[in-house]
Image (spheres, rainbow, N blue to C red):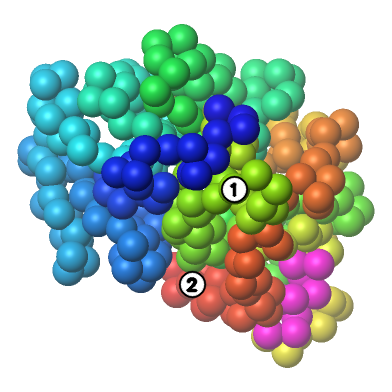
Amino acid sequence: MAGVHADDQPASASNHIKNVAVVGAAGGQGSYITAELLNTGQHNVTAITRLESTSTFPNGVSIAKVDYDEHNSLTDAMRGQDALIITMNARAPQESVTKLVEAAIDANVPWILPNEWGYDYTDPDVNRDTMLGDSQLAIRKLIESKTTKTAWIAVACGFWYDYSLAAGVSTFGFDFENKKVTFYNDGTAKVYCSTLPYVGQAVAKLLSLPISADRAGNERPCLEEYRNSIFRVHAFHISQEDMLSSVLRVTGGKEGDWTIRHVTPEARYVEGKKMFEQRDMIGYRVMLYSRYFYPSLPVKELEDYSDARLGLNQPSLDEVTKLAVDKAMEK
């Protein structure tokens, strides 16, 4: 819909998203998105949850309990929604995600943010090796093939730094209790990272944009720019060496206190794959993280990211690191 402007729309048409449905509104990422949407004062938020769910939600959130086995139950919950946000476990059944998307399409929901919170799935080799890309691309194709009334926007936010740093050796390689860290090669390869609150802020900013440009020549961003496209944001562009430096600053430690193991990401990926093949799910995390440190991974330029355009508030690296270290030591 390039070239469509708010000035060209009927007077009765709204140029902003009002009603937003969130799947996983009480979850790790969904709870932050829900909170930030409420904070804007511009959105009515509905939590879509299973009939048997006992999750609790913030004041101001409407609740729609659904039966995933009944298409009409899902469709009824979607009617009148301007956007659907899906935040589920990365390994959630593809069938569940497909059911949600099909219901949203049938309910004429204009915008869907699929269950994509990480990589942008532009490299087929990474898609294959992480076992995520095919399912994500299938959802995009499903939307595009069924309708022009509904569009997808994929949120590519990199790893959640706050979650990943605290998660242990299987992610960014840190063992805080024993002061050991596994570096991929020399530890200087940089990856894009966000935080859970930062992604919540980014999504709320995105869905608060005008749907169409106010007028021709206006450089203010609008939602239509992201139609069937990727919305890239990041809080940090950071290496493991940078992470360790931050850890030392917030803990008052010295690098000499730490044992640093060096391994190639390719070899670490093989280690994780063997674990996964033996039904150790930690192995999958090892596969996922090590794959993104391959030297051959295509790296998007910083200019491809929307942080500055949306005026996002960059968090303090050391403050996030301290929260992650404290969380890791509580385990």
Query: Which label was assigned to residue 150?
Result: none
Asked whether 277 falls inside the magenta stretch, the response is no
Q: Nearer the viewer, residue 298 or 250?
A: 298
| Coordinates of residue 326 in the picture (x, y in percent) | 52, 78
Numbered disc 2: secondary structure: helix
| Residue at image point 83% right, 64% down | 241
Amino acid beneath label 1: Arg
Residue 228 in sight in this render: yes
* Residue hosting label 1: 215
What is the quadrant of residue 66 in the picture?
Answer: top left
| Left or right for 47, reference 281 | left
What is the quadrant of residue 148 in the picture?
Answer: top left
Residue 86 in sight in this render: no
Q: Which residues are magenta?
A: 242-250
Foreground: disc 2 or disc 1: 1
| Residue at image point 40% right, 11% down | 146
Q: Main secondary structure of the magenta part?
A: helix
| Residue at image point 18% right, 65% down | 60
Amino acid beneath label 2: Lys
| Coordinates of residue 73 in the picture (x, y in percent) | 10, 27
67 relative to 37, above or below: above
Q: CA distance from mark 2 to mark 1?
A: 48 Å
* Residue hosting label 2: 327
Q: Nearer the viewer, residue 20 or 222?
A: 222
- Tell me if label 2 and label 1 are in contact, CB under 8 Å: no
Location of the N terminus (image quadrant): top right
136 relative to 30, above or below: above
90 relative to 166, above or below: above
